[in-house]
Image: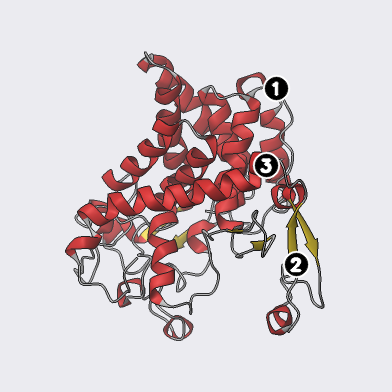
Amino acid sequence: MDVEFHYYITYLIAKKAGFSNEDSSIIAYSSQYVDDNTMIFKINKDTAEYYKNYISQTMNILKPKAKLFRIYPLFHFIPGDPLSTTALRRDGKMQWLNTTPDSTNANKILDKALNTDNKYRIGIAIHSFADTWAHQNFIGYYDEFNSMTGVLEKAIPDIGHADARHNPDWPGLVWKDKRLLGQNSRVNNKERFCLAAKRIFEKLYRHINAEPNNSELTKMQNELVEDIKIALKERDQDNSLDKVRINRYIRLSETAPYGGKTLIEYDEDEWFDDAVNEDVRGLRDKSDFSLSRWDPFTDQYTWKNILKYKEKPWFKFQEAVIAHQNDAWDVLNEVTFSKLDLDINTF
């Protein structure tokens, strides 16, 4: 999934489930920032306030296996039920690391986050939970199980959904996964995303309401799904981040069922810029410009408020990343990782 679901739709889900505007914003931003937290920063080096963050995403699929394994299965490809009917393949293969939607493992990880009531933890776990729909039938590890047919695909490393490129993440796209058996090979992202939204809403609604009204829950789920379908209509095959759709999500946020407050557009630098000073030396390290990685000069980072940096959302998010990683590892190691002979170093 991309920013449309992880930020805009996640906000609408949280707000309709009963979270405040502020908490819904934290949950939604945390959910999307999982994908944008791709760089390790060394802040206030050689001082008592020195801090080095963990990353929750990487675009560098050539990283060592152990480093990729610390990221992909914990944040993006939670191993599920390899015997699920959604995982039936034409070649009959099964993989214990296969991602399947709404799995027991994914539910355990989200429940752990919900039990903390930490909105940053909840947002991160929602990201992982939602991705079990978008990333189903792929694994967060190098394996031919991920391989798809085609000349171009054969040249791409078999990690995650690299072979399928962005197809699993684009809202509204209908595409073909020829590895799958029968009707499963026709993938309708709108259907997958709506199922994910419906289930996430249920999890959040039951968390907010000690005595949930099941009939009210079902009614609100159906209303949510219909609103999402309307937001996605007419541009179903437009794979770009479409301004028309974004405006629909924002207009929905302004209606009573979604809090009546305008949701601001996502800015991936907002939290970081609020907490950290950036002193660029040479080419900007944070730049997408590919040559910046060869720049011999390292940018310097310092806290904007040395006394209150731990109160900033960026710092709280980074601490939540560490906590999620530890909890997710504990869940998955107990039931999956410890049973397999994996070619990785000790976590």
* Tag count: 3
Q: Which badge, 1 or 2, comes first in the chain's sequence?
A: 1
The residue at 46%/81% (across/down) is 156
Q: Which badge, 3 or 1, comes first in the chain's sequence?
A: 1
Pinpoint residue 172: horizontal percent, then vertical percent. Answer: 54, 51
> Element under label 1?
loop
Pinpoint residue 73: horizontal percent, then vertical percent. Answer: 38, 60
Judged left or right of residue 331, residue 172 is right
> Element under label 3?
loop
Residue under numbered circle 2: 300
Q: Quadrant of residue 233?
A: top right
Of tags 1 and 2, the one toward the viewer is 2
Q: Amino acid at mark 3?
A: Lys
| Camera-side residue of 187 and 282 | 282
Q: Which badge, 2 or 3, comes first in the chain's sequence?
A: 2
Distance between the alpha carbons at the discs numbered 1 and 2: 41 Å
Residue under numbered circle 3: 312
The residue at 59%/58% (across/down) is 37
Crowding at mark 3 (Cα within 10 Å: few <14, some 14-19, many 20+): some
Residue under numbered circle 1: 260
